[in-house]
Structure formats: C-alpha cells, structure tokens
Image (tube, rainbow, N blue to C red):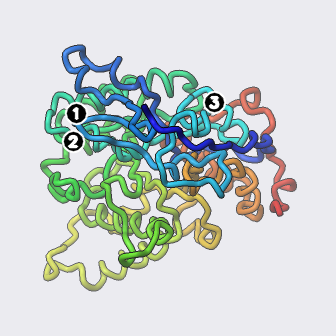
Amino acid sequence: MAEARPKWELLPDPEVQERSFTIISVDDHLTEPSDVFEKRFPARLRDRAPKMVVQDDGAEAWVYKDRIYADTGLSVVAGRPKAEWTDDILNLDEMRRACWDVDQRVLDMDADGIWASLCFPSGAWGFTGRVLSLNKDDEVGVAAIRAWNSWMIEEWYGAHPERFIPMQLPLLKDPKMAADEIRANAELGFTSVSFMESPHLLKLPPITDRAHWEPFFKACEETGTVISLHTGASGFTLQGSPGTGLNTQVTMFPGSAFCAAVDWVWAGIPARYPDLKIALSEGGIGWVPMALDRLDYVTEHSAGSAAGASWTYDITPREALQRNFYFCMLDDPSTLEQRHLIGVDHILFETDYPHADSTWPHSQDLLRKRFGSLPFEEASLIAGGNAARIFRHPLPTAADWPTVITDPAVLATPAA
C-alpha cells in the first residue's frame, strides 16, 4: 500500500488583473494528464506506451522504457505558498488544477490577463520530448511523439484554439521523417515545433552537419513553423561550481541562450534559411546587445579563414542574429532601453507558468511597471503583437477582450 502523502494547501484563487495589454506568452508549461498516451497508441504497441503509476511512497510517476520519469515540484508551484515549494514530486491532485486541466488553465490565464499561451511539455519528457523520441525501439518512440502531438492539437489547443499556440514535438532520430511530420502537422494547424539547441549533447549529429539536418530546417522554413528553442532542451544548461544550488543554474539561463544563438549563427543556419524563425524561450534579452557587438568584433578580427571559420554568406553574422531570432523576456528592465538595438519587433514576452520563475498572477502589473515609459505601440508589440505575427495567431477583437486599456495617459504611470 502506498504511503500517506503530506497534506498541501493551495492559496486562494488570485484576483482578476486589470488588463492593459494583450499578452501572448511564448513559454509556458503543462503537466500531461494520465490518459495522454495509452489511448492514442496503436493497439499492438499499447503495452509499451508511457503509463502513470503510483509508487510505494504515494508519488505518481510515468513508466516508460522500463524506467520511472517524473517532473519536480518546482515546476508546478503556481498557487502554492513559497514556504511549501518543494523539489519533491507532486501528484496531480497536489498541484493547481490548471497545470493539467485545459479549462482551468484558461481561467488562470484570464485572471492574469493572458490572451494566448504556447505550452512546452512537462520536464518528465524534456522540453523537446526527447525522452519520448529517443527510444531504442524506433516504432515506440514515433508512436509516443505522435500521441503527444495528437493530444496537443485535439484536446489542449482544440479545446480553446483562440487561446493556445499549437506547438508540436519533433521526431529526433530521422530528419527526413521529422520533415514529413512538420509538413503534415502544419496542415493540422501547428505553427511551432520545440527543438534542441545542441543535438550533439544527445549523441545526435551536431547542427553543423548540414546534410543531416537540412530536411528538418527546410520543412520548418517552407511551412512557416517557428522553431521554439527552450533553454535546457538538450538536457544541459550552464552549471556553476560543484556544490552550488539551483539558483546558480537558473541565474545562468540567459548565458545558455547566448551560447545557443551564437552557435547557430556561426553554423550558418539562419544564413542558409532566410525565412526560418527561431524563438529563444527563457533566455531573456539582456545578452543580445553584447552578442551583436561580439559578432561584429569577431567578424572583423578572428573569424577569417585562418581560424577555420570563414563566412561566405551574403549577410553578416550580426544581421543573421537580428533577422532570424526572436528573444523572449520574463523581466529584463535594464535592457529595455536597448530595445531598438535588439529590434522592437523581435522581442517576445513569456510568463513561464507554472514554474517558480513565473510572473503569474501579476503579469499585467509587471508590464505596466516596466512598459510605463514606452510608447504604447511598442509595448503592445512586445506584450503580444510580435508573437501574434510570427506564430500567425489571431489577436482578440474588442468583444473577445473587452477591458483592454489603450489610453497612453493611463499607461504612463507605472504600477507601484
């Protein structure tokens, strides 16, 4: 018999925020309900589908590939008192229902003034679903990815299509098959795909292997499918010294985005695929001005053929970063003054619900505070207009979202 679990208390529902901006969050997360996989697996493979089980200590976890997988409690802290934040596994009934119930998620979005959301999978599977895809049994890995994607389009996005940006998980082992999936899923309505910044860390060919990854990148470009690169999607983030805690790693997240962007730029990916759009989730924007300066400096100095890194494209590395990449901010107040250098039309916003980093349920208050001195048109682009454009997601009409404040005089006074 499972051990008794400690009793956890959730905070009362937050008050509904006054809406000043139409916010689209391009980095949120969900917890998969227990019935996601089995009912979508082919019957002959169903015994190998991920299954949720209750362990001896009472914790719910997934069994897949004869191993146990679970997310940590810090990934589902929304609505919990900080004193009760824990890295232990939380069961579905111990977290805010909106973590896994799409109808409740929309209510939490309403409370925070979030018009639409792009949701990555739970940490159990990795942000690209790499645990699902990289199965020694290729047939099972493909079935797992297809099951998650069909659940996303049919039940999560499908329940409220105006409120979610449908993002798919990729098939990682075979780029040609992955490209076919991208095209088929584009027909179903998917506008984004999660991908890893450093595939070589997963013992896959590196992004510098042009022939290997070309079918995938070409399919994304042709279909307008935005590549959502989440920090840590390859299972690695920058680390501190031995013995340092999670705070060190989380503080370094923007450094991981910097590394990924520079790596992809010098690999020539944006230069070869001019219409490809790459959104760097949970990377912030503070590092971008430095990266632009550094790309220029290296181009002028050490990037010659003698260094083995000659640049033969018709745009500069700096231009490649500015053209193809989109930079996602949680809260970067010191860098907003550099927004024109970065590109006002290339900055996106994220709430990271329901993680410990999340701005929920105070996102509108935060943007009023940060954007109070910005022209309303620019603030609106960053809050949601840019995301609506690149992910091809409709913005609400006045009837859909009736309380949006557009009077610049109202926004000129930042919240306390």
Count of labels in the image: 3
Q: Do callouts 1 and 3 mark residues in contact (Cβ within 8 Å)?
A: no
Disc number for residue 134: 2
> For the point 16% across and 80% down, which residue is it?
307
> For the point 33% across and 51% down, which residue is it?
274
Q: Do callouts 2 and 1 mark residues in contact (Cβ within 8 Å)?
A: yes
> For the point 44% across and 34% down, which residue is it?
2
Secondary element at tag 1: helix
Sort mark 3 into few (<14), some (14-19) or many (20+) by Cα contacts within 10 Å: some
Which of the two labelled residues, at mark 2 and mark 3, occupies the earlier sequence position? 3
Query: Is there any visible trace of residue 49 in the rendered image?
Result: yes
Which of the two labelled residues, at mark 2 and mark 1, occupies the earlier sequence position? 2
Instruction: From the image, tell me which residue sits under label 3.
Output: 104
Vertically, is 108 above or below 280?
above
Secondary element at tag 3: helix
Front residue of 405/2: it is: 2
Q: Amino acid at mark 3?
A: Gln
Instruction: From the image, tell me which residue sits under label 1.
Output: 141
